[in-house]
Image (cartoon, rainbow, N blue to C red):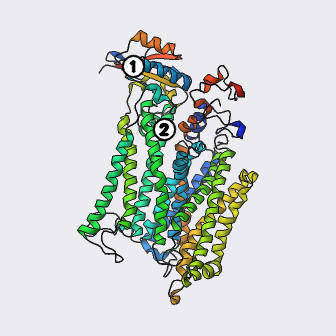
Amino acid sequence: MSSANAPIKEIGELPLAAEQYDFHRITEDVARITENPAPRGWWVLFLTALSLLGGLGLTLAYLFWKGIGAWGNNQPISWAWDITNFVWWVGIGHAGTLISAVLFLFRQKWRTSINRAAEAMTIFAVICALMFPGIHVGRVWLMYYPFPLPNSMGIWPNFKSPLLWDVFAVSTYFTVSLLFWFVGLIPDLATLRDRSKTKLRRMVYGAFALGWRGSNRHWQHYERAYLILAAISTPLVLSVHSVVSFDFATSVEPGWHTTIFPPYFVAGAIFSGFAMVLTLMLVVRVVFKLHGLITLKHIELMNKVILTTGTIVGYAYAMEFFIAWYSGNDYERYVFFVNRATGPYAWAYWTMILCNVISPQLFWKKSWRRSIPLTFVVSIFVNIGMWFERFVIIVTSLHRDFLPSSWGYFHPTPIDVMTYLGSFGLFFTLFCLFIRWIPVIAIAEVKGVLPAADPHHHEEHSHDDSHHEPAHGEASAEA
Amino acid sequence: MASANHESTVSTGEKKPVLMLAEFNTPGECLHAAEKVRDAGYARWDTHTPFPVHGMDGAMGLPDSKLGWIVAVMALTGFVSAAAMIWYMNVYDYPLIIGGKPPLALPSMAPVCFELTILFSAFGAVFGMFGLNKLPRHHHPIFYSDRFAAATDDKFFISIEVDDAKYDAKKTRALLESAKASHIEIIEEEVA
């Protein structure tokens, strides 16, 4: 092997970035997105998102004025789209952390070209998620209740409540994700600072780059910090969706009271998050022409994760039914076998099965995993399916509780619909601003995985600058 | 090869050299040059690369990062603070009996104790790293060099401080030249 980063061609490995990339070309291709005028596709997306965000503002103003009676929530369906959307958005965020932390610990170097965007997606998705419980409390000006602040009532939050655990889990998750993202950005912000043509850019990027000068004495602590952040983010991301699932699992509601929930929620979160990463990256690589950095290999690998987690989620659905039957509990059996599979919400249940369990199975075939149109369609299906999963869990379980006289059906109001669409406006506005002003690909990290980044790369090639493998016998003994 | 201090328009004071900056084209050349500088016994010097070069810590003879200890202390602080907070609020100051469980119910404390352990560790890792690296530091003489902008693009640098005990304008330059530096310059700073 000529270089630690070179692909092993004997086992069919492909390069992580297209062959024509050298250090400078990576800087150019990524930095130019923030320097050139935005392409038309960006403006279309940005203005659409901004309009939706404006709609969200108006909707929320109306909601605060009117109270959450403006939603379709009722008794017994006191949680509906608000909490569905919350869980859905948090779940989407999880893929970003999985890519940035878990794949880093497993030394999956292909993550470098997608981790920046995936981490940004995490942060924006968690912002959208946090909005929903925030507005669901109704009296938003009392939002400080869950925080352990001294107050004139002389009482404290109840630390035995899973909802309070959720406050700590999601806010910790947001803070740590933001820190992790910023640490990763520092060297790339320095790159933008050093390329700045205007004083304003140099000042703004320079301020955020903190005076980074690529010093190896700094890189040493930096890399250690990155490793530690990855190591603590891994249990964190597993804990966050586990804690979210406790909101349901610690209750005594049939359909919620299930020990399989924590791992099942985590797998579902990764599943939906990868789908969202794919949806976004397939668009970004076309709009900004990044085909050489986000290659078919990346798409294929992400599709493998979708296939795996989709299958785990399918297993969890089956196991819920099995345990309901095996428990011998009449209420459990009713909720799953009668109500969920054939009741008034059966349409939602079977939509979920089609999108989450069946559609990813297409990816067993290699050529289908590498098909861009199919990947795009399946990623949208999974996004829809995972929304329905949370809808099925929340609304189907609640709408027929223990007291048949209060059984009901949930009808969303236009305010429900507009709040959900508006959260897309918030997400895509933030995402558009991100791809326009912040390096969308981790420049320093991608450079670090090029074959030429290995200090011994050039020596063994002696006078040959090309990236070809030396013949078998030439492999140097001193390496 | 002279100073690249084009930025300063008013040169009132005297200038004195502060850094010798050598440029390299590949990570390998920079790494081997760093080994030579290390072996020559320099102490106040550094390498500057667009990405962390594998093996550079050894080539510079750097000891292991102490960051892990900072994070360990912060993790413990986070855990203890969370447990103490829950105990004070729900057991001591205003006991709450929920679900027939004792006020001090350890299983229900696990999630919040865990989250605060992680939160404090993350603060320790990020701000500890800033502290060890003495960042933010927006002003540094090395930025006077025009060529240094490439340190965040595709060039590799070694900087040796003039204050280093081993520094000698001729010998240090010869050492860097023998290590295949493609360009060497002296960075000067105005004496305040």
Q: Residue B43 appears at what percent x and percent y?
A: 37, 22
Q: Is residue A204 visible?
A: no
Give the camera-side residue of B76 and A54.
B76
Residue type at mark 2 is: Leu
| Left or right of A330 on screen, residue A161 | left
| Relative height, residue B52 to residue A42 (above, below) | above
Give the camera-side residue of A229 and B134.
A229
- Which residue in the rendered view is the most extreme toward the top? B170
Q: Which residue does the numbered mark 2 point to in the structure image?
A: A189
Q: Secondary structure at mark 1?
A: loop
Residue type at mark 1 is: Tyr
Q: Which residue does the numbered mark 1 point to in the structure image?
A: B42
* Number of numbered discs on residues: 2
Q: Secondary structure at mark 2?
A: helix
Chain under numbered label 1: B
Give the camera-side residue of A302 and A189.
A302
Residue drawn 66% across the image and 53% down it? A304
Residue drawn 65% across the image and 60% down it? A380
Q: Which mark is residue B148?
A: none
**Closer to viewer: mark 2 or mark 1:** 1
